[in-house]
Amino acid sequence: MKLIATAAGAALFGLLCGGAHADPLQIKIGWATTPTHMQPIIDALQKRHPEVFHHFGKTYVAEGVHFQGSTPQIQALAINDLSIAAFGPEALALAVNNAHLDVRMVADVFQDGVPGYRTVQYAVRADSPIKRVEDLKGKKVASNAIGSFGDSAMRVMLHKHGITDRDVTTVETKFPTMPAMLMDGKVDLINLLPQFDHFLKDGQFRVLFTAADGEGRIQAQLWAMRAEFIKAHRPALVDFFEDHIRAVQWLLSPAHHDETVEMIAEATKAKPEAVAFAYTKDDSFHAPDARPDIPGTQKAIDLQVELGLMPKGIKVAPKYVDLSLVDEANKRLSMASGG
């Protein structure tokens, strides 16, 4: 009996001293379209090259969750069904002002209007009578989700040319269905993803304007998290961002481009040549260090308030920004590389 008691006591001591390990933090990450949103491709990379992810399965596990756009993620973040939301600048302001969430911009997803990189394009049929933005009055425009970046950038351009929301009919639909809807005459303007550029090359579509025409350089999509979630899980989140930045840099590396295209083709069911643009200068800009453009975020919000697209904006910095996670992660990576 004494031996049993001693063994039980030793086991209890071991548990109290760290023999018991907490479950890894579950991180759910919102995304809308890939490969521009990297998360689904990072999920694929983790399965192919787990060596890139030093902390996955130990202190955290992460997975992407698909949404139609930015704004549907506000509710998911509010009810804790989502850990990290991919917001456009407008959605960040709406999360604060309408949903009353204490959120922080924590990282980059992608930026638009960066010199030398692709900007989001809005296309009409090549034989369309629409030659100018003003010609869209009374027409049907496609949107993935009201208040998303793609939707907001389109409305900025329309408002700058005197076209209000009441002057057009908005048809909400998924990005992959937009080209077919344009071809069938169900809509007159779409947000043309780069994987559908063959419609331009074939002479079936033409670009009417771009997001950069209306907004210049901005933070198109950013990662946002609730402040309380950051406070409760900071060490695991730094581990996550260390792995995330390492994965982003892996995908951006020209040395890995062929394999990256292969993963994207598998994830999107597209032909490799259709997605070969990804993570090159033919794509949107992705920050290799995951740091977002704070002035670019503020600029986008201010412009939408000025044009009447939002009744109220926010002052993004310093209250709604927390770059400490990516900064600590980058510091670790720099030290590991001898920088």
Image (cartoon, grey):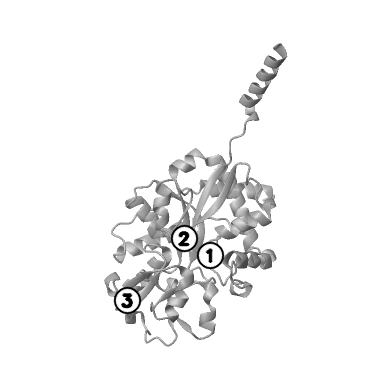
Give the mark nearer the N terminus: 3 vs 2.
3
Please name which of the two marks, 3 or 1, marks the residue nearer to the observer. Answer: 1
Which one is nearer the viewer's eye here, 238 or 174? 174
The residue drawn where x is 64% and y is 67% is 261
Q: Earlier in the sequence, mark 2 or mark 1?
A: 1
Would you name the residue on which mark 2 appears?
Answer: 221
**Disc number at residue 36?**
1
Q: Is residue 208 visible?
A: no
Assess whether mark 1 and mark 2 are in contact (beta carbons under 8 angstroms).
yes
Q: Please say if 202 is above or below 311.
A: below
Q: Are marks 3 and 1 in contact (CB under 8 Å)?
A: no
As helix, strand or loop, the secondary structure at mark 3 comes to loop
Mark 2 or 1, closer to the camera: 1
Pick out the residue farthest to the top. 2
Residue depicted at 52% across the width and 75% down the height: 196
- Where residue 248 sits, quadrant-wise, is bottom right
Amino acid type at image mark 2: Gln
Residue 37 placed where, x, y %? 53, 61
The residue pinned by badge 3 equals 161
Q: Quote the CA–CA distance across marks 3 and 1.
A: 28 Å
User: Residue 267: image x %, image y %?
Assistant: 59, 64
What element does badge 2 sit on?
Answer: strand
* Up/down of 12 relative to 44, above or below: above
Bin the neighbour count of mark 3 within 10 Å (Cα to Cα): few under 14, some 14-19, many 20 and up: some
* 175, above or below 183, in the image: above
Residue type beneath disc 3: His
